[in-house]
Image (cartoon, rainbow, N blue to C red):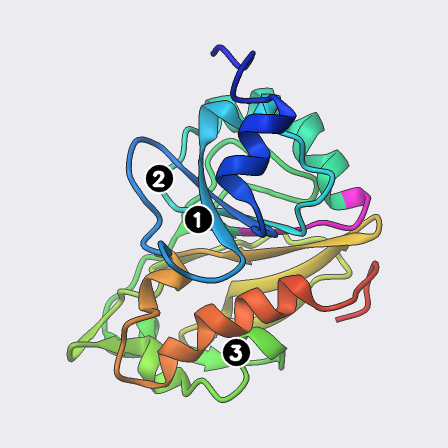
Amino acid sequence: MPTDTWGSTTTQAARYSGASVLALTMGDDSGLAGTPRVADLDLYRLPGFDLSRVRGLLLGAHLDQIFLRRHQGLLDEFISRGGRLAICGQVVLPFAAGLTPFVPLAYRNVDDLTVRRVGEHPVWHGVDPHDLTFRRGVAGFYGRGYYPALPPDALVVHGLGPNAYPLDAIYPHGAGEVLLHGGNDIWGYAGDTTSAARMTPQLLDWIMAEHGGAKR
């Protein structure tokens, strides 16, 4: 994709002034328009974008994983130098250090889809797992699968069902960290009337906080 003008310092400064977090999109918007510190960036413009002042990248559930995998080196470098990467959805083609394929859950009832808190992390502080399990009275919106092969130093925050299959996890890579959620975009809950709405501002606070390596 052409990046000659998009990647220029002048263009970036005009369009992304003050944005420390980029939400990658594909011809749509992230739903975060107007949120301080955040700007949308078309995925295919990422290779030509200067990330030196960016603190975090938000990768939603419906991005082109073939393209992301082609540019894994860029993402790994961003994380290793201290960036934070928030990944939502079902990874089929691992495109960043530590990622492995998502496994759909063979659920049979609501209990299998119940979100269980197994670790603590600032992104989910004050969020009631019940508000993640059920949305508009229906279970399964937050996640219907898991990541069975996480890095050994990963912190699992939520699991699914009686066996607490890993659904939400954080792990370090170099001086940065990866947040992995095996379901719909967590920033899609920003307008909820439940405690789930806390995730979006707390995610941005976590990205902006001073950090390094395994410090969480």
Q: Measuring 70% from the left and 62% from the top, which residue is drawn there?
A: 154
N-term mark: 2 or 1: 2
Q: Amino acid at mark 3?
A: Trp
Residue 136 in sight from this viewpoint: yes
Q: Are marks 3 and 2 in contact (CB under 8 Å)?
A: no
Residue annotated with mark 2: 62
Residue named by callout 1? 103
143 left or right of 202 in image: left
For disc 3, the marked residue is: 124
**Amino acid under label 1?**
Val
- Nearest the viewer among 177 and 29 is 29
Please tell me which residue is depicted at 55% across the width and 56% down the height of the picture. 180
- Residue 105's place in the image compared with 137, above or below, is above
Residue at 73% x, 45% y: name it: 79
Q: Earlier in the sequence, mark 1 or mark 3?
A: 1
Disc ID at residue 43: none
Query: What amino acid is at disc 2?
Result: His
Q: Residues at badges 2 and 1 in contact (C-beta under 8 Å)?
A: no
Separation (CA) of disc 1 from disc 3: 23 Å
Mark 1, Cα crowd under 10 Å, few <14 / some 14-19 / many 20+, is some
Q: Is residue 105 left or right of residue 18?
A: left
Above or below residue 125? Residue 112 is above
Residue, far left: 137
Residue segment shown in magenta: 80-86
Image quarter (top left, top right, bottom left or bottom right) of the C terminus: bottom right
The CA distance from mark 3 to mark 2 is 23 Å
Residue 29: x %, y % from top left: 31, 44
Q: Is residue 73 left or right of residue 212?
A: left
Q: Secondary structure at mark 2?
A: loop
Asked whether 84 falls inside the magenta stretch, the response is yes
Task: Name the spot of residue 188 as percent of width and height, x first.
Answer: 33, 61
> What kind of element bears circle 3?
helix
